[in-house]
Amino acid sequence: MSTSPLATLARLPPGLVWPADRLARPAEAGVPTGFAALDAQLPGGGWPRGALIELLMDAFGIGELALLLPALRAAAPERWIAWIAPPHLPYAPALAAAGVRLDRLLLLTPPDPATTLWTTRQAVASGGCSVVIAWLPNAQHAALRRLQLAAEASATSLFVVRPGGAAQQASPASLRLRLQPAPDALALEIVKRRGPPLGWPLQLPLPERPAAFSGRADRRCSGLR
């Protein structure tokens, strides 16, 4: 007796397959982003857990750190928050004032792109970090795939910052957001999510926008370790 594909799919466990015209329903709820408008557009209602998330932008300091502040504040206190190869030196007083625990912050500045990739993968795979933020302008698909797998295995949230032009390239990331500046806000385009494309950009007001960078990242900040 033949069975239609739709009937077969209907008998699969909930969450195993999602129709492409609606958002996926992950087994575990996402981490709230702190922005209700964004949560409403993400499967799981927040940042996907144990996943690679790409932030694509053409300039730094447009509000990307304000976007991540709620996730940094909510990071598990027994695990680390790792910043790897940031373009400028984090400004510790501003982060502390925003509620980020400096005693759980790691600032890593590897000397070259290959070491930066290796360091990122070790930080993610260790399972010791709650959140890893890595600036990887030249990461290739294979390297991103390894990072995605490591994030899944260690249940670590990995945010990778890449140039805006990378939006035209394929990526194994679970979520890809393109960020652009906007007056008193951050314009955000969902390039990829588990669900149908979002046909319009989001405008997220940024009540918190700390001056989180104070200079070049070629020296350590005494407030971080």
Image (cartoon, rainbow, N blue to C red):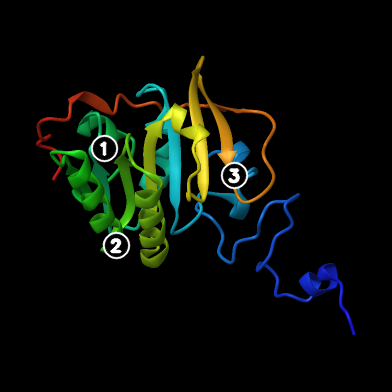
- Disc 1 crowd rating (10 Å Cα; few below 14, some 14-19, many 20+) is some
Instruction: Give the residue at x 42% y 26%.
Output: 63
Label whose residue precedes the other's in the sequence (1 or 2): 1
User: Compared to 197, does 17 lie above or below?
Assistant: below
User: Compared to 209, does 9 lie above or below?
Assistant: below
- Disc 2 crowd rating (10 Å Cα; few below 14, some 14-19, many 20+) is some
Amino acid tagged 2: Ala
**122 sits to left or right of 41:** left
Nearer to me, 59 or 90: 59
- Residue 125 disc label: 2
Residue that lies at the very extreme toward the top in this rendered image: 183
- Residue 96 disc label: 1
Residue 74 visible from this viewpoint: no
Residue that lies at the very extreme toward the bottom in this rendered image: 1
- Residue 9 disc label: none
Q: Are marks 1 and 2 in contact (CB under 8 Å)?
A: no
Q: Position of residue 15 (x, y in %)?
A: 66, 67
Disc 3 designates what residue? 39
**114 sits to left or right of 1:** left
Q: For the residues marked 1 and 3, what is the alpha-carbon distance in whole angstroms?
A: 25 Å
Nearer to me, 112 or 217: 112
Amino acid tagged 3: Asp
Instruction: Give the residue at x 45% y 33%.
Output: 166
Q: For the residues marked 3 and 2, what is the alpha-carbon distance in whole angstroms?
A: 27 Å
Secondary structure at numbered mark 3? helix
Residue that lies at the very extreme toward the front in this rendered image: 2
Residue 183 visible from this viewpoint: yes
